[in-house]
Image (tube, rainbow, N blue to C red):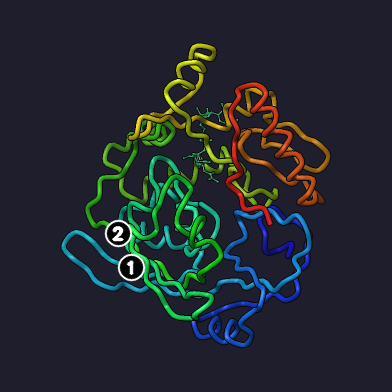
Amino acid sequence: MKKYNSFHIEASCLKRISIFSKKDFVEYAGQDAGRNYKILGGGSNVLLTSDLDCDVLINKIKGINIQRETDEDIFVEVGAGEMWHNFVMWTVSHDLGGLENMALIPGTVGAAPIQNIGAYGVEQKESFVSLKAIDKESLKERIFTNMECMFGYRDSYFKNAGKDKFFITSVTYRLSKNSVPNTSYKDVSEWLASRAIEYPTPNDVATAVIDIRRQKLPDPAEIGNAGSFFKNPIVDQTTIDVLSGMYPQMPSYPLDNGTYKLAAGWLIDQCGYKGVRVGNTGTYKNQALVIVNYGGATGEEIKAFSEEIQQAVLDKFNIRIEPEVNIW
Ligand code: EPU
């Protein structure tokens, strides 16, 4: 599995099977109803902590197909096995807006709705129309609308009641022909201002995001990682009042419902864990929220290190940070 997970963990599975179409999946799953298998897209949000006693299906369903068009929008159905970043590059090369802030996120299109990926002030749910999935039990196709996916911050139906129940085959996005890019995020607006770009195109924003990400985040091709290891915690007003009294510099972002999102990276950094190395693992030098494999780390080793960080944050701030990465 080493080449199929962005942490580059050595682990085996029974069989690795590429799925290129709905038919491939139905044929595989139909052979034996009680069959135990796991589904993987780009392997960029998973930590393998042991060998897998089951088959692993790699989703390779491809295709970018325009479904319909209005004066304002284009609806595009994308194969779940397309690489997300390649699809984002396709959108900006057609001057279509909506996904540009999420350039360079590793992984596949089919994985994007599962954890409702997001970056630089935009989440995929804002452009998401629907997805098609095959029910693993009945092997019937189902369409999920945006509402039915119950998207939240790094969350969806597919991480809760629908967990492990579906094989996603395609996702449809609505892309805008005349969108006003979201440049609310300081890093992005500063990047554009420093180049005197006043009216950025989707491609300009994608270029900015790619540049910013390359500076802050390690490239999984060079150093094993799965992006942010933890989710940013969401806390209530009382907690914010107490903590911001103690730590006036602490970043926090108000949400619609009166709660606040804290920066897990900042909390970890404050515990002295930025750029720390323990054995073959550690946190990245430019972003404490990213745990890396310096080479040869086991999944267990990374998991133990993540628990050490979790405990340090709990001890110092009385806040429990939860993994964003799926631990297998
Ligand atoms: N910070 C520190 N020290 C650190 C890291 C961060 O002080 O080591 C501070 C930063 O200075 C900033 C704040 O924490 O004030 C937030 O940091 P940043 O802007 O880097 O964003 P983040 O909250 O750490 C989230 C996403 C990233 C996404 C960025 C940009 C999550 C879990 N992570 O990170 O997503 O790229 O915002 O939008 O929501 C991912 O999910 O894998 C991922 C990389």
Q: Nearer the viewer, residue 22 or 195?
A: 22
Residue 259 occupies quadrant = top left
**Quadrant hosting residue 51:** bottom right
Front residue of 206/68: it is 68
SS assignment at label 1: strand
Foreground: 307 or 24?
A: 307
- Mark 2 and mark 1 lie on one chain; the one further toward the N terminus is 1
Say which amino acid is labelled 2.
Leu
- Disc 2 Cβ-to-ligand 1 distance below 8 Å: no
Looking at the rendered structure, which numbered label has been put on residue 304? Answer: none
Q: Position of residue 218 (x, y in %)?
A: 63, 44
**66 or 25, nearer to the observer:** 25
Disc 2 vs disc 1: Cβ atoms closer than 8 Å? yes
Query: Quick check: 128 left or right of 20?
Result: left
Q: Residue 318 in the image: x percent, y percent?
A: 61, 24
Report, in whole angstroms, how far the alpha carbon at label 2 lies from the one at label 1: 8 Å
Q: State left or right for residue 202 relative to residue 297.
A: left
| Residue labelled with disc 1 | 76
Question: Residue drawn at (45%, 17%), measured in percent from left and top?
Answer: 241
Residue lying at 49% horizontally and 11% vertically, measured from the top left = 245
Crowd around label 1: few <14 · some 14–19 · many ≥20 (10 Å): many
Local secondary structure at mark 2:
strand
10 Å neighbourhood of mark 2: few (<14), some, or many (≥20)? Answer: many
Report the disc number at residue 175. 2
